[in-house]
Amino acid sequence: MGSTVGLRSSPRAWGCGWNVARLLCFAAICWVLGTQMEVGAWTYHYGNKSDYSWELARNFCRSFYTDLVAIQNQGEIVYLNNVLPRHRTYYWIGIRKINNVWTWVGTNKALTKEAENWANKEPNNKGKNQDCVEIYIKRDHDAGRWNDENCQKKKRALCYQASCQRSSCSQRGECVETIGNYSCDCYPGFYGPECEHVVRCKNLDPRPDCSHPLGEFSYNSTCKFQCQEGFELQGLDTLQCLASGNWTAAAPECTAVKCPALATPGRGQLNCTHWHGDFTYNSTCTFSCEMGFVRNGSETLACTALGQWTVRPPLCEAIKCPVLDSPGRGRLNCTHWHGDFTYNSTCAFSCETGFVRNGSETLECTALGQWTGHPPRCEVMRCPKLRDLEPILMNCSHPLESFSYGSVCRFRCTQGYFLNGTSRVQCQPDGHWSDKMPACQEEAAPYFKQVLLYMGGGAVALVALLLTGMFIALLIKRLSNKEEEKTLLNPTSNLGAPGVFTNAAFDSNF
């Protein structure tokens, strides 16, 4: 037979002492144990018909009651020691060594140091197989304390009928047995006497995609966030309502996807429209260039949902003018401000010695991509043409062009004429000949020849006359000398005549 010990802490939960149980053991509902209890009360029961091993004792308790007793506190131990009858083999309780750890089998929780109630020098594991626990009831010493024992030993089963039912604490907490009643130790996220209330978290707005297993925005609610195209989450994409009433993190925000910031191009302007922030999704930017520069690339760019611009930013490049070449026989000297032969480039032209520029000296590249004029040419310097009219004869060489810089002309006269002037002239870089053109003149004129002839004849006649006179004078002198010799030889001659003396003196003078 079995006996019941009823423990209660409220008027609705009661039981009888073990003597009373003997009177009720014949009740049909508990013919084996003779147990009586009220729903909602925690009651203790023990078998008094036979002793069992620990396993059979537990099977007995679980078959008719809840389980082997689980000691809640020292008060229960004192109570049990007072109301239970002494039994020579004592009573099994619901503690067993599992994986070398003393464990409450009803809850499968390890025995804590604070809850230990071992007798002196126990547990000692005597025989190396003392894996079960008995409680000393009304023992002379260590009454109400525990002892480790071989599980095959025969002892009475000390059972309990739990006040806690499957529906207790709304299945949201641990039902804690008390004497004749129970209390609820609510699981995290629940509160109330029966853990009937669920902790709530702050509503999320705008409402994301959520699942609410226990109520809207309540404990264990899970919310997933996602953003529209072109936006990205800043924060966790999934939040869960915690037992504390707080979400696992602050609600994330959707911010516009950013594209790389654009810079104003050199020699250009940038004009942007930002809908969701600078250089973010759907921002549009328009490019333009200063005068004299042209855009190389798209005029408008848009920021896409991928954080990329639709195309690469354009560049402002200087407008190009046609490339200029140095003119033949000339030189080209250019200044380029923005690139070769581009807007505002200036080019000056000059020519070699002996050549003259035909056109503007300086050209400038305009904003239309055109030069301010046509490129000049270097033309050879020309000298006045020379004519070769008889009697002058002219022979010219022209290394470049006729009668131009470097041309050389040589002159001679036809027979009967002589050259009056230079015989050679050359065309100079300034377009002038090196000398005046010569002239051909006739040799002496006819009348001049006659004059010369007459003058020559007179001179001859005069010379002849002089020679004749000298001859006559010489002849006379010789004749005079002969006459004198005759006189000297002839004493009768007039030696003292004055005439003779005069002639001698003339001869002497002659």
Image (spheres, rainbow, N blue to C red):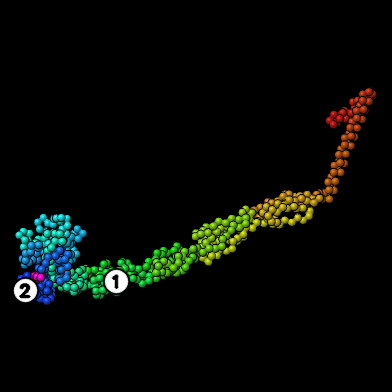
Vertical placement of residue 241 versus 445, above or below: below
| In front of the other: 33 or 357 | 33
Q: Which span of residues is magenta-colored?
A: 1-5
| In front of the other: 160 or 237 | 160
Give me the residue at 26% from left, 73% from top: 213
Give me the residue at 52% from left, 57% from top: 335
Can residue 59 be seen? yes
Residue 499 x %, y %: 89, 30
Question: How many numbered circles are shown?
Answer: 2
247 with respect to 378 (left or right)? left
Can residue 183 be seen? no
For marks 2 and 1 on the same chain, the one whose residue lies earlier in the sequence? 2
The residue tagged 1 is: 223
Residue 501 x %, y %: 87, 28
Callout 1 amino acid? Cys
Q: Main secondary structure of the magenta part?
A: strand
Asked where in the image residue 26 lies, by quadrant, the reply is bottom left
Give me the residue at 15% from left, 68% from top: 60
| In front of the other: 126 or 53 | 53
The residue tagged 2 is: 23
Question: Does the magenta portion include 349?
Answer: no
Callout 2 amino acid? Leu
Q: What whole-number distance in Å separates the C-alpha atoms at marks 2 and 1?
A: 61 Å
Tell which residue pokes out farthest to the front in this image: 50
Tell which residue pokes out farthest to the bottom in this image: 28
Q: Residues within 10 Å of mark 1 (few under 14, many from 20)?
A: many
